[in-house]
């Protein structure tokens, strides 16, 4: 059998650069120019094209995201990852909480915060007054009732309060529905206002953390509403002798994260506001 001599490739058989498709579409490269050098290289190293496109995209580098195609990578440029309330990763943050608060004029925000602060003080004093008969018995305060967790412990606390104390506690819990709306509004506006100031004077990361803090304040209010509903149900069931352990357990589970969220929001507001104030004084 005679050996077939390999046919040397002439300049006519070598595809010109203009004949090779410039698109990153793999199908077009395969069908239009199967002999294109870049196509052969891609067949040997299929990750090369995607890796190059991903590295060249700022949003892909920021989000540490491997896209399925170059089109997906390009589309990610204006879609940063967003977590609770605004702790996002990306070049820009376009969440919902900041849109609401930033759309409120500064003067209006100040007026609402002052009104909310005044209402919070009034409601706090009213709740403290309503709880006086219960606390005078030495049977425990409202926080002890919130973390009772079991039907036996709740029964012990409610029994020690007596009939007058239980009525006062129920009134304080009903007032707390208004109080939670007020403090959630106040803290969310405070965190948002501090976040907007921090964006100009500190960093964008602190700005995003502010919207997370604002969202935590709202979440604390929701948990407080759940807790109040369970506590009122427990008080109403006391006279029947059928207190539900599920009610007390849910109330305790809601109370824990509620206090944590409130503390985190307050720490953010005081910490960042204090830093901005000290920076202003030093300048």
Image (tube, rainbow, N blue to C red):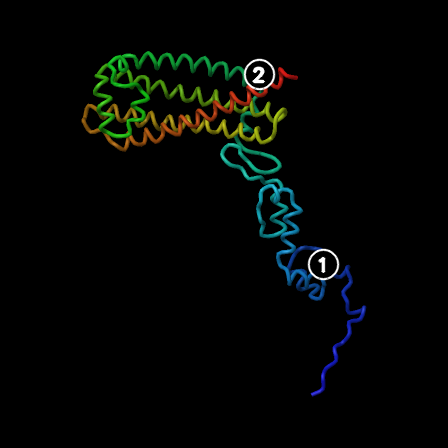
Residue furthest to the bottom in view is 1
The relative height of residue 271 versus residue 58 in the rendered view (above or below) is: above
Which one is nearer the viewer's eye here, 168 or 103? 168
Regarding mark 1 in the picture, which secondary structure is present there?
A: loop
Q: Quadrant of residue 44?
A: bottom right
Q: Residue 183: which quarter of the image?
A: top left
* Residue where numbered disc 2 is placed: 107
> Camera-side residue: 141 or 85?
141
Residue at (49, 34) in percent of width and height:
84
Image x and y of residue 128, in percent? 34, 13
**In the image shown, does 32 or 199 lie closer to the viewer?**
199
Distance from Cα at disc 1 to Cα at disc 2: 58 Å
Does residue 82 appear to the left or right of 228 in the view shown? right
**Residue most extreme to the right:** 11
Q: Which residue is mark 1?
A: 21
Please state, as top left, top right, bottom left or bottom right, where the C terminus lies in the image: top right
Q: What percent of the width, then of the height, locates residue 76?
A: 60, 44
Q: Tell me the element at label 2.
A: helix
């Amino acid at each position: 059998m005679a050996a077939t001599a390999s046919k040397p490739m002439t300049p006519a058989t070598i595809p010109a650069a203009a004949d090779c498709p410039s698109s990153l579409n793999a199908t077009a490269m395969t069908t239009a120019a199967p002999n294109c050098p870049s196509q052969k290289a891609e067949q040997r190293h299929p990750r090369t094209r995607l890796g190059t496109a991903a590295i060249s995209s700022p949003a892909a580098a920021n989000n540490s995201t491997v896209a399925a195609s170059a089109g997906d990578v390009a589309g990610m440029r204006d879609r940063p990852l967003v977590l609770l309330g605004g702790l996002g990763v990306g070049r820009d943050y376009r969440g919902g909480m900041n849109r609401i608060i930033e759309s409120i004029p500064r003067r209006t925000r100040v007026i609402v915060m002052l009104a909310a602060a005044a209402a919070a003080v009034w409601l706090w004093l009213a709740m403290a007054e309503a709880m006086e008969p219960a606390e005078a018995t030495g049977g425990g305060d409202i926080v002890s009732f919130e973390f009772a967790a079991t039907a036996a412990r709740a029964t012990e606390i409610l029994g020690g309060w007596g009939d007058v104390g239980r009525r006062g506690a129920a009134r304080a819990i009903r007032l707390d529905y208004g109080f939670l709306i007020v403090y959630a509004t106040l803290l969310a506006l405070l965190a948002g206002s501090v976040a907007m100031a921090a964006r100009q004077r500190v960093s964008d990361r602190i700005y995003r953390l502010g919207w997370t803090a604002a969202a935590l304040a709202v979440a604390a209010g929701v948990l407080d509403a759940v807790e109040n509903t369970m506590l009122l149900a427990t008080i109403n069931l006391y006279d029947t002798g059928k207190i539900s352990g599920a009610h007390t357990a849910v109330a305790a589970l809601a109370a824990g994260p509620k206090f944590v969220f409130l503390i985190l929001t307050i720490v953010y507001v005081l910490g960042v506001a204090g830093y901005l104030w000290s920076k202003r004084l030093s300048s």
